[in-house]
Image (spheres, rainbow, N blue to C red):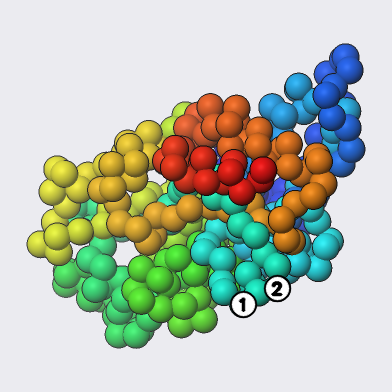
Amino acid sequence: MKNKLFFGIFALLFCNFIISNRTFGQGKLEGRLSFSGAFALYPMAVKWAEEFKKVNPEVKIDISAGGAGKGMTDVLNNMVDIGMVSREIYPEEVNKGAMGFAVTKDAVVAVISAQNPALNDILATGLNPDAGNDIWVTGKYKTWGQAFNSKSKTPLHVYTRSDACGAAEVWAKYFGKKQEDLLGSGVFGDPGLALAVKKDPIGIGFNNIGYAYDFTTKKQISGIRVVPVDLNKNGKIDPEEDFYGTMNDLIEAITKGKYPSPPARDLYFVTHGKPTNKLVIEFLKWVLADGQKYVNDTGYIILSKDIINKGLKSLN
C-alpha cells in the first residue's frame, strides 16, 4: 500500500484490515482488538497496529473505517473496543460513557483538481476564509470568479461529505458552523471525495491531509492540488503563507501554529468508559509512548508532552 488514498479505498469497500501473525516468537500479550471510525485516523491506526504486532505477535487487530460518527456509535454500542474519532467529543457522548484519548494531530485542507483551468491563479490567490464561508455555507458564490476574485464565469462545483465525519465537522467549525450546515454534493469518505474532486476540473472540496498527500513521497497526490489559505486576506499568498508544497512543510506549519485550528485538530481513540481490558490499556499506553515515534513518518503531528502525559495518567 503506497499511500493513504489506497488505504482508504479498502475501507470504502468495507474491508477490514486484519493484522496477521507474521512474527515468530512468544509475545507479551494476546487476544484481539477491534477498531472502527474516522478515515483520518485509519492509516495511522494501521501503522500502529503493524508495529504493535511486531512486539506482540499473539495479538490480532481488526480495523475498519467508516467515519467518526460510525466509530463513536460502534464503541458506545460495544461493537468495537476502540472508536477512531477525528473531532472533539460532544458532551452528550461523554454522558453516554465516551472516554477520549488524544493520540495525534492532523488537519483538513481545501482541494481542487490539478486539471482546473485556472490552477496557477487559484494557487497564487489562495482561499480567503470569508470566501470559503460563501462557498460552503451561504452558497453566495456560484462561480470560480466570485470565489477567487477573477472574471471567470465558470461554474463552481462544490463537494462535501455525505457521512458523519470529523473532517466535515472541523471544516464547518472553521466557519463557525456544523457539518449539516455545509452545502455541496455529498460524497462518502475521504477517498471518495478526493476522487470526485480529482475527476472534476471545476470541483472544490476538502480532505484530511493524509488523503491530499502521499505519505511515502510526501508530495501532493497526483491529480489533486491543495489550495493555500489566504490567512491575512490580502488577495494573495505571501511567502509566510506558502507552506503546502510537501506534507512535511504543512506538518511543520501546523506544529508551529501557522495553520489555523480549526481546521487543524486533535485525533482521538475513544473507549466506552475507562478501559478495564488489559490489552486495550496496554495498547493505548504503547501508542502514547513508543508509538509516537511513528507519527511524523506516517504524515501526522506529535501531540505536546502535556497532552500525552495526561492520557497516560488517565490510564493508571
Q: Eyeballing the image, is 188 above or below 53?
A: below
In space, the residues marked 2 and 1 are separated at their CA atoms by 6 Å
Mark seen at residue 92: 1
Q: Eyeballing the image, is 165 above or below 288?
A: below
In the rendered structure, the answer to whether residue 233 lies left or right of residue 174 reads left
In the image, what residue occupies the spot 75% across and 52% down?
A: 275
Residue 146 found in image quarter:
bottom left
Local SS, label 2: loop
Labels in figure, total: 2
Q: Eyeballing the image, is 300 above or below 175?
A: above
- Judging depth in this view, the residue of 281 and 175 nearest the camera is 281
In the image, what residue occupies the spot 44% across and 61% down?
A: 206
In the rendered structure, the answer to whether residue 128 lies left or right of residue 193 reads left
In the image, what residue occupies the spot 61% across and 77% down?
A: 92
In the image, what residue occupies the spot 47% across and 32% down?
A: 296
- Judging depth in this view, the residue of 161 and 180 nearest the camera is 180
Q: Give the residue at mark 2.
A: 96
How many residues crowd mark 2 within 10 Å: few (<14), some (14–19), many (20+)? Answer: few
Could you tell me residue 50's position as x and y percent? 72, 30
Q: Are marks 2 and 1 in contact (CB under 8 Å)?
A: yes
Residue 143 visible to the viewer: yes
- Which quadrant of the figure contains the C terminus? top right
Residue 163 visible to the viewer: no
**Amino acid identity at mark 2:** Lys
Residue 245 found in image quarter:
top left
